[in-house]
């Protein structure tokens, strides 16, 4: 009898407030064994301003966001900043970055996030990488924003499995 696969909690954050489907594409893979994905809405976060922290208490929307990150086992810039204010919610978490964009598919922003992750003590998976040029034919998303590209779905699945396995190794 095979051992049960432990479930890891993944916090999915979009680096944009635009209604683009890249982060929602992961919902296609939410049935992957051992992975529970929570999509975190960052649209209500205020710009980082530590003057909003009064007597060690964060604004309610920020505290709710920080709690979502703390509960995740693996979790943009403004959201990263709010979660990094002491105590650092990102510390010792496994992470993966996926992006969909224009010509480079968000690759440059991925590398910048990896640099920021060093300071935050985030541990990124190195491979596989995922850069999706979402604007070049054939269509990658349908009119409702659902990922329809079979190759991209397979690559996302590989990333989630790698992230799950890496997270479990870090927890040992």
Image: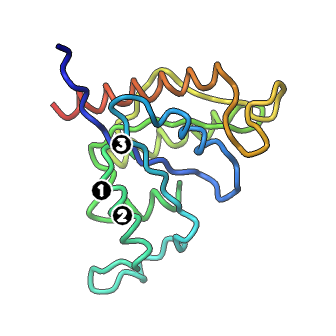
CA–CA distance between discs 2 and 3?
Answer: 13 Å
- Is the residue 147 above or below the residue 59 in the image? above
Please indicate whether residue 53 sits to the left or right of residue 28 in the image.
left
Quadrant of res 124: top left
Q: Which residue is under mark 1?
A: 70
- Is residue 150 or residue 18 the one in the foreground? 150
The numbered dot on residue 66 is: 2
How far is disc 1 from disc 3 in space, using C-alphas? 9 Å
Residue 169 placement, left or right of 109: left
In front here: 163 or 46?
163
Residue furthest to the front: 1
Q: x, y percentage for residue 45?
A: 52, 70
Residue beneath the point at 36% across and 49% down: 120
Looking at the rendered structure, the secondary structure element under dot 3 is: loop
Q: CA distance from mark 1 to mark 2?
A: 6 Å
Q: Coloring scheme of the render? A: rainbow
Of the numbered discs 2 and 3, the one sitting upstream in the chain is: 2
> Label 2: few (<14), some or many (≥20) within 10 Å?
many
């Amino acid at each position: 009898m095979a051992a049960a696969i432990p479930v890891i909690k993944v916090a999915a954050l979009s680096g944009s407030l635009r209604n683009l489907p890249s982060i929602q594409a992961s919902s296609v893979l939410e049935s992957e064994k051992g992975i529970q994905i929570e999509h975190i809405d960052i649209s209500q976060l205020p710009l980082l301003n530590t003057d909003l922290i009064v007597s060690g208490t964060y604004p309610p929307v920020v505290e709710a966001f920080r709690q979502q990150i703390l509960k995740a086992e693996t979790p943009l810039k403004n959201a990263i900043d709010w979660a990094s204010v002491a105590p650092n919610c990102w510390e010792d978490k496994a992470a993966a970055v996926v992006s969909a964009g224009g010509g480079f598919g968000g690759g440059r922003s991925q590398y910048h996030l990896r640099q920021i992750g060093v300071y935050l003590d985030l541990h990124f998976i190195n491979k596989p990488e995922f850069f999706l040029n979402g604007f070049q034919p054939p269509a990658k998303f349908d009119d409702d924003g659902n990922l329809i590209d079979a190759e991209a779905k397979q690559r996302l699945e590989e990333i989630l499995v790698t992230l799950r396995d890496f997270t479990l190794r870090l927890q040992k």
